[in-house]
Amino acid sequence: MSHSPKGTGSLVSTEGTRHTRISGVGGYRPERVVTNAEVCTWIDSTDEWIRERSGVVSRRFAAKDETVVDMALEAAGPALEMAGITADQLGAVVCATVTHGYRTPAAAPLIALRLGANGIPAFDVGAACAGYCYAISIASDMVRGGSADHVLVVGTDRLSEATNHHDRGSAFIFGDGAGAAVVSSSDVPGIGPTVWGSDGEKWDAIRQRLSWTEIQDRSERELAGEPQDWSDAGAEDARSASTLIMSGQSVFRWAVWSMAPVAQQAIDQAGITADDLDAFIPHQANMRIIDAMVKQLKLPADIPVARDIAETGNTSAASVPLATERMLREGEVPHGGLALQIGFGAGLAYAAQVIRLP
Ligand SMILES: CC(C)(COP(=O)(O)OP(=O)(O)OC[C@H]1O[C@@H](n2cnc3c(N)ncnc32)[C@H](O)[C@@H]1OP(=O)(O)O)[C@@H](O)C(=O)NCCC(=O)NCCS
């Protein structure tokens, strides 16, 4: 027997605004400064090598009990203030993070609750260092589609916890922090088209050493009196098996050769040229990657380039908003200017867009 459809009327669809903009940004850097000299007490390296190869001079580490949610709240406050709104005006929270302590639930509902906006849609985006630029794109589409009027985007990561501090290939590069932005409706375009994508063939290039399932299995065997050898994962124990491992050189090559064309496409699709930019704000992965991208994009020499990595390290999802916040606060870029931002990393995943600075 066949059924004919019941509904005959057409569905009502939401209608959003034509344009969106970033109306506020904020950042939070934890108090504890970790110098290269301190890192060199954990690995066989030198301050000079770390500066030369990565550009990092110091990074911040969160306090023992300071979570990605705590840091996100510190960054969200100033972002809301700059946007001129209060938390009860938010329509959603999108949190970009890969270091929230729980597989589930997400960090975002806790951020909404603690902001005093309990009840609104809140979810996490797991796109690692591309997470913030992914989330800006999603939030912008949500506002344009009429699902929310103002969306809080937070990039917050506590990479100190996800780093094996004895791994020479990664111990010096990562740091902790949070950056936030409010995406709002606008009369004129304030967020250009996002150029984004992923490459699952390079899924292995930056990843957790062992899956949680594997860690649980081995830990259970260890508890049952069967000693485990973790060295195949470059780890000493269950804890360090949950840290990140990175094929530094292949990530470096990918970032240098593949990301400049993505950034160029974001400029082209925004309908501007590099000469129109007031700032270039790339993911703070490595100073040499930043330099190579500037060269390949043939950016005019007078365009300010974010170099927050020197004092903040690579903070994954927090890196682009933290660099943005610093440039605005230090008067290096004008409010209302155009910035090209690009995030890229584990996945591998990437996203770029030209935005008008709040
Ligand atoms: C990690 C990274 C800085 C390493 O720099 P590199 O120039 O590729 O270094 P290599 O691994 O080729 O090692 C070069 C030499 O330095 C040595 N070395 C490696 N780590 C070292 C350290 N921490 N201190 C001192 N020497 C080190 C190596 O042993 C090697 O010595 P050798 O030439 O005698 O064999 C670089 O690959 C990088 O930044 N990659 C991208 C990582 C990144 O951006 N990740 C985040 C993306 S989101």
Image (cartoon, rainbow, N blue to C red):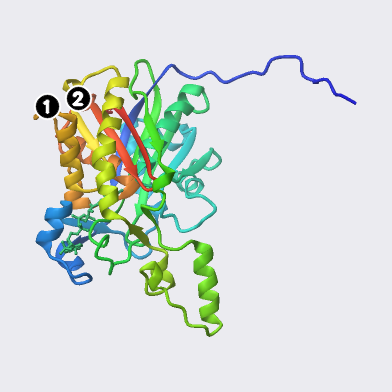
Q: Residue at x 87, y 24 (%)?
A: 2
- The x, y position of residue 237, in whole percent, is 41, 74
Cβ atoms under marks 1 and 2 closer than 8 Å: yes
- The x, y position of residue 66, in whole percent, is 37, 59
> Residue 347 — which label?
none
The quadrant in which residue 182 appears is top left
Residue toward you, 230 or 82: 230
State which quarter of the image contains the C terminus: top left
- The x, y position of residue 209, in whole percent, is 41, 62
State which quarter of the image contains the N terminus: top right
For label 1, the crowd category at 10 Å Cα-Cα, with few meaning under 14, some 14 to 19 and many 20 or more, is: few
Residue toward you, 80 or 253: 253
Q: Residue at x 35, y 65 (%)?
A: 64
Q: What is the count of numbered marks?
A: 2
Q: Would residue 178 be visible to someone looking at this image?
A: no
Callout 2: helix, strand or loop?
Answer: loop
- The x, y position of residue 83, in whole percent, is 34, 31
Q: Would residue 183 be visible to someone looking at this image?
A: yes
